[in-house]
Amino acid sequence: MYTNKPHRDKTDLRVRRTRKLLWEALLALLQSRSFESLTIQEICDQAMVHRTTFYKHFEDKFSLLSYGLTEIREMLAARSYEDRILHPMLTFERLGQPLPLEAVLRSQPENGFLINMMQKHACDSLMKDLEEAERNGARFRIPLEALASFYSGAVSSLATWWVLSGKEIPAQEVDRYLQSMINRRAFFPGSEANAATGESQGSGSE
């Protein structure tokens, strides 16, 4: 029986490769240029991709940036909720990934647009986690939007501080700072969840 699955696989591989090239080109340019000043043509030249090809994948540079952050978010989604909440810095290290736009934070520490984009994606990701937990029976005492907004802002600010300080402090220690500043019960309501949180904290320090 004929199937076009091999063709689809090859197509998907080409799509992923092209998007990866464009994302890496954007990151490379952002180390010395502001996002606002970049043009689509400059990104294409850096990636050695035709401009028409770019528009087959992305509407504009904003959608490319969103794509890259979404890819990072999906990698993190493979980790447990507890790890992502209590050990975000260590989780990135275990994935073998730098913090989102880490090189950009070093070269453009005052670029509020990029930091806000990172925070928005972190907030959206956490909202999905909280909504799923609520569907599974968790009863949060604080509105989910408030929890997600507070936490994403705290983690983004802490990550920015850590990067700009040269990351001289181990990721595990920075996570401990975060744990000291948040109320765990707000994110893990219920005695059973709190017990699971304690176990996760222990495993995260291994």
Image (cartoon, rainbow, N blue to C red):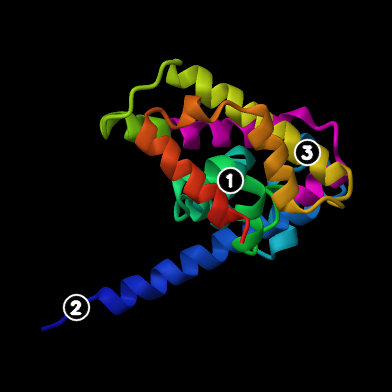
- Residue 29 at what x, y percent from top left? 79, 52
Range of residues picked out in magenta? 102-128
The residue sitting at 54% across, 56% down in the picture is 203
Along the line of sight, which residue is nearer the eye, 93 or 205? 205
Residue 175, given in percent of the width and then of the height, sits at 68, 44
Residue 118 sits above or below residue 102 on the image: above
Closer to the camera in the image, 49 or 196: 196
Helix, strand or loop for disc 3:
helix
Q: Position of residue 81 (x, y in %)?
A: 45, 44
Against 108, is 95 above or below? below
Q: What's the residue at 63%, 56% (across, down)?
A: 205
| Residue at the limit of the structure toward the bottom, as seen here | 1
Majority SS type along the magenta span: helix
Residue 103 within the segment the image draws in magenta: yes
Q: Is residue 199 magenta?
A: no
Look at the image and tell me in which quarter the N terminus lies. bottom left
Quarter the C terminus occupies: bottom right
* CA gap, disc 2 and disc 3: 49 Å
Which residue lies under the disc numbered 1? 69
How far apart in space, not on screen, are marks 1 and 3 (Cα)? 16 Å
Residue to which mark 3 is pinned? 160
- Camera-near label (1 vs 3) is 3
Q: Earlier in the sequence, mark 2 or mark 1?
A: 2
Residue 18 in which image quadrant: bottom right
Number of marks present in the image shown: 3
Q: Residue at x 59, y 62 (%)?
A: 95
In the rendering, at what x and y percent does residue 21 appear? 63, 63
